Amino acid sequence: MDSTNQFISHPGKSTLPSADRLQQLAISESGFIFDPVSGHSFSVNETGMLIVRLLQQGKDLPATIAALQNDYNELAAVIERDLMEFISLLREQVDASI
Amino acid sequence: MNTSNQCRVAITGMNAKPDNPGPGVAVARCLKESSDFQGQIIGLGYDSLDPGLYMQEFIDESFLLPYPSAGEDALLTRIEEIHYSTPIDILIPCLDAELPNFIRLAAKIKSLGIKTVLPDAERFRLRNKDRLPELAEHAGIECPDIKAITNVSFFKDCHEKGWEYPLVIKGIFYDAYIVHHKDEASSAFRKVATQWGYPVLVQKVVKGEEYNLTAIGDGKGNLIAPVMMKKMALTDKGKAWAGVSIFSQKLLDAATRLVTAINWTGPLELEVMKDRQGRYQLIEINPRFPAWIYLSEGVQRNLPFALLKVALDELAPVYSDYQSGILFIRYAQEIIVPINEFESIVMSGTGNNTSGIDES
């Protein structure tokens, strides 16, 4: 099974906040992120910022993985696992239901 | 009658205990810091240790009022006394417990030439805590169950009737305690009943995050200058110690539906919880500005000044979108009060602020 199929086969875990919702986030160069709708704030590292910016552009999961592979010399499966974990944390901060 | 930028504004709620401050000092501060306001502020307190009475940077003249329990006749007599010595153009009540008296006296206060922006008695009752579910349903908003009780025996077997702990025990006007078992509930019931009378309210707990919205209702179903915030830190009494401005269209829509449903007139504060399903649940509607109203000046929507415009039938200011991500962080500090100023308040109920009101 390739990584794309894994995402599709676990839609509950991999559902992304929409690009529109993510575009509402205010992101500073330091990695500090403020959500003006929920009032939540949190911080991410350089890789996290890159992922959020890719998702803000409307990239889907396979495209995000491909973009990360360009920057990080790592297997797609490893990137996918870390990305899934990051998205899970991101969803805790960004409540898509608002 | 003076215009909004030159008028004399009397404000109640000069109490400011750090864990639960009244809104009056913050309302006065908003006006004093508005670049459009050059008027005078008259601080009205209930206790000689209300700090706002002595804060000369925000308050030009200070007076004591009789406690609300003294009744509306005593209140009117005192307002007349103050008005004859220090004319008032606009009166802004800021405390829940005093509002019923001010609403009943609204016509008489108006006949003195003093403007207020208050709901009538029926609209005021519609937002009573024990009627919230009814109002929320009418406006299409979720609301936790609430029950008015007069007997402590309710807690003996309430968990068998769908009222499982934890519960919130509330006074009809003010105060709230979260309780986790029968003994705690009985103790909170007695405490609330002693201070605020009957009935005592029991509300089911909503787990989630608390958001607040403050605005002015114009009495025609419109919401003027809404400002929303998320509480970031709380005092032991659950009051905001820090907060951040936010903008949620969903919360704004809910507030608009509520204000339209009751044609609210005057300042208000909505307290809602966002539950784990992302639904806003209405917890309270407070008929006044909140103690965190200074955040409205912080986001360039000075609500107390907007209220003056509404009171004087002037065109309400048009506000552009406000900035989310503006924080307030509350702090406590001491003010130094010469004994003669304290003496003046204690002995005559009148402050002798050296700044005074310029009668010219």
Image (cartoon, coloured by chain):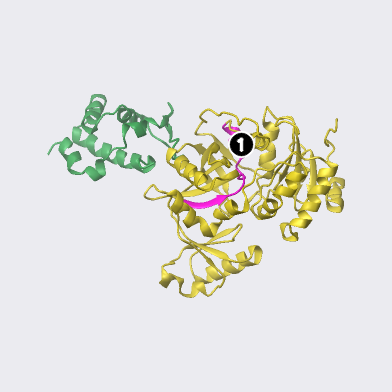
Chain colours: A green, B yellow
Whether residue B321 is situated above or below residue B279 in the rendered picture:
above
- Residue situated in front as seen by the camera: B143 or B24: B143
Residue B352 in view: no
Whether residue A85 is situated above or below residue A50 in the rendered picture:
below
Query: Going by the image, does B47 lie left or right of A91?
Result: right
Task: Give the quadrant of the N terminus of chain B.
Answer: top right
- Where's residue B149, x and y in %? 54, 68
Task: Give the quadrant of the C terminus of chain B.
Answer: top right
**Element on which disc 1 rests:** helix
Whether residue B43 is situated above or below residue B69 in the rendered picture:
above
- Where's residue B347, x and y in %? 87, 53
Residue A8's quadrant in the figure?
Answer: top left
- Residue situated in front as seen by the camera: B116 or A40: B116
What residue range appears in magenta?
B282-299
- Where's residue B274, x and y in %? 43, 48
- Where's residue B93, x and y in %? 68, 47
Q: Which residue is mark 1?
A: B303
Whether residue A69 is situated above or below residue B9 in the rendered picture:
above
- Residue situated in front as seen by the camera: A79 or B74: B74
Query: Going by the image, does B231 lie left or right of A32?
Result: right
